[in-house]
Amino acid sequence: MANASRPSLEIEKSIWGSGAKVVAGIDEVGVGALAGPVTAAAVVLTPSDNYSWFANVNDSKKLSPARRSLLSKEISGSAIFSIGWSSSEEVD
């Protein structure tokens, strides 16, 4: 099993190995619907793509602003993604 402190593609590779065509990962950030807006993102990966940038992926709080910016460009250039925002009123 991969080191828990670093992301890996082990689970995705297992899912692709079982015949899945795509795997989507999602995450959200925000202080919660009671206190403010929520932002969520989804990234869709396929087994045939080359994700050379993945070795640099980590928790965003562990990355420098420059590294986050570079990864953002690399990910958006090679993966299907979407970002959404909802106000606390919309969530309620």
Image (cartoon, helix red, strand yellow):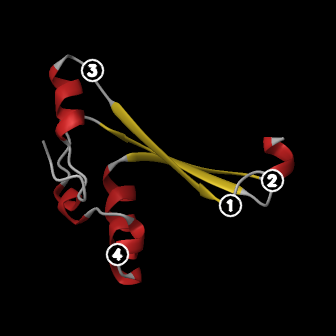
Q: Quadrant of the N terminus?
A: top left
Q: Which mark is residue 59?
A: none
How far separated are the C-alphas under marks 1 and 3?
A: 34 Å
How far separated are the C-alphas under marks 1 and 4?
A: 21 Å
Mark 4: secondary structure: loop
What amino acid is found at the position of numbered circle 4 in the picture? Answer: Leu
Are discs 1 and 3 less than 8 Å apart at CB?
Answer: no
Q: Nearer the viewer, mark 1 or mark 3?
A: 1
**Neighbourhood count class around disc 1 (C-alpha, 10 Å): few under 14, some 14–19, many 20 upward:** few
Q: Which residue is mark 3?
A: 20
Q: Quadrant of residue 5?
A: bottom left
Q: Which residue is mark 1?
A: 31
Q: Which mark is residue 34?
A: 2
Q: Nearer the viewer, mark 1 or mark 4?
A: 1
**Neighbourhood count class around disc 4 (C-alpha, 10 Å): few under 14, some 14–19, many 20 upward:** some
How far separated are the C-alphas under marks 3 and 4?
A: 31 Å
Are discs 3 and 4 less than 8 Å apart at CB?
Answer: no
Could you tell me which residue is drawn at 17 percent across and 48 percent down? 50
What amino acid is found at the position of numbered circle 3 in the picture? Answer: Ala
Decide which of tag 3 and tag 4 comes sooner along the chain: 3
